[in-house]
Amino acid sequence: MVTEIKQVKQVLTSGIKPIWCAGCGDFGVQAALVKALTDLGIDRSNVVLVSGIGCSSAMPHPFSTYGVHSLHGRLLPVASGLKLANDDLTVIGTGGDGDGYGIGVGHLIHTARRNIDMTYIVMNNEIYGLTTGQASPTSFIGAKTKSTPFGDIENPLNPIALALSAGATYVARAFSGDPMHMAEMIKNGIQHKGFAIIDVFSPCVTFNNVNTYDWYRPRVYKLEQAGHDSSDISKAMEKALETDKTKWEKIPIGLFYKTQKPVYSEMDITLKNGPLIKQPDPDKTKINSILEEYL
Ligand SMILES: Cc1ncc(C[n+]2csc(CCOP(=O)(O)OP(=O)(O)O)c2C)c(N)n1
Ligand code: SF4
Ligand SMILES: [Mg+2]
């Protein structure tokens, strides 16, 4: 075990300490991601973590992989560009519920339907943590936050149902209280060819005193142990909506859905010839003649 930790430190730790409060669920995600990358043995020089803005979006800093800390809600366009330019990269998006389900939700829909070959981990704490506790798109009705002092009146977004209907080809959920299970979800997501999303219940111990580890623990159960058929999208949608029906008394985690479809770069007329960095320099005379048309 000691050897394993040493190896992880040597390979994946940048030396930068995470900014998170003691007990933040994002530590569980960091541990699961370290385990997933270590188990898969991917060369860290071929891994890039891309984040938006938020506590959770600080994830790339403690890693010695490549990392991009981009703009609020914009991690998916940056990640898509990286993958299309250099197909050899393992591209992993790491952000929050505000980042991905609020300001960046349009990008989620379009990245899913394009089936960009990447993994997207959303640390869903049902709150804006970094900005000190405002309601997020997944906050529950009645949640009292800085921006909803009389209780949230907006319906929470259902990320699993959204991802399924947008065309994501790998849809899973994990919980920071079970990092070993989360590592499996992440590992399988990285190995999946296509857009993989993992919604993670990652408690904010400072600004969300409702959705705590103790609140989740008796409610979550694993789809893998419940005989769920993850190849059937109707069954997956049924499970996605179960939380609404059971008023969050039963919360499925695990793999909801997985299917195989061509990824974007296999269909695009230019990318079919290989990633951009491996293609010969474009013919400048052709580009110039196109530009001249607009002058
Ligand atoms: C364009 C823009 N709008 C708003 C902000 C302020 N802001 C920073 S982080 C954040 C929300 C973060 O919430 P979430 O993505 O859930 O991350 P968490 O901190 O909870 O991990 C907001 C609104 C910003 N940085 N940029
Ligand atoms: S404020 Fe919440 S989300 Fe941010 S680091 Fe602290 S516990 Fe984590
Ligand atoms: Mg959040």
Image: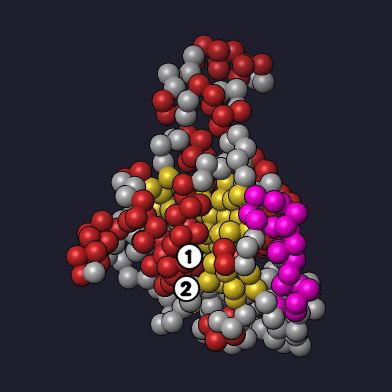
Q: Which mark is residue 272?
A: none
Above or below for 250 versus 81: below
Tell me the quadrant of the picture where the C terminus can be found: top right
Look at the numbered discs 1 and 2 and tell me whether their residues touch, using CB distance below 8 Å: yes
Compared with residue 274, is residue 162 higher up or lower down, i.e. above or below? below
> Circle 2 sits on which residue?
178
Residue sitting nearer the eye, 232 or 280: 232
Quadrant for residue 64, please give it. Answer: bottom left
Q: Is residue 115 above or below residue 202?
A: above
Compared to residue 277, the image places residue 178 above or below, namely below
For image coordinates 61% across by 28% down, the residue present is 267
In the rendered structure, the answer to whether residue 232 lies left or right of residue 99 reads: right
Q: Nearer the viewer, residue 82 or 172?
A: 172
Query: Magenta region: which residues?
Result: 229-248
Q: Is residue 13 left or right of residue 178?
A: left
Residue 89, given in percent of the width and then of the height, sits at: 41, 41
Say few, some or many: other residues with alpha carbon within 10 Å of mark 1 (under 14 / 14 to 19 / 20 or more): many
For the point 38% across and 67% down, the residue is 31
Residue at 76% x, 72% y: name it. Answer: 244
Q: Is residue 108 left or right of residue 93?
A: right
Q: Could one spot residue 87 in this view of the protein?
A: yes
Q: How far separated are the C-alphas under marks 1 and 2? A: 6 Å
Q: Is residue 133 magenta?
A: no
Q: Position of residue 77 (x, y in %)?
A: 57, 46
Q: Which residue is mark 1?
A: 182
Say which element carries label 2: loop
| Secondary structure predominantly adopted by residues drawn in magenta | helix
Q: Position of residue 44 (x, y in %)?
A: 32, 49
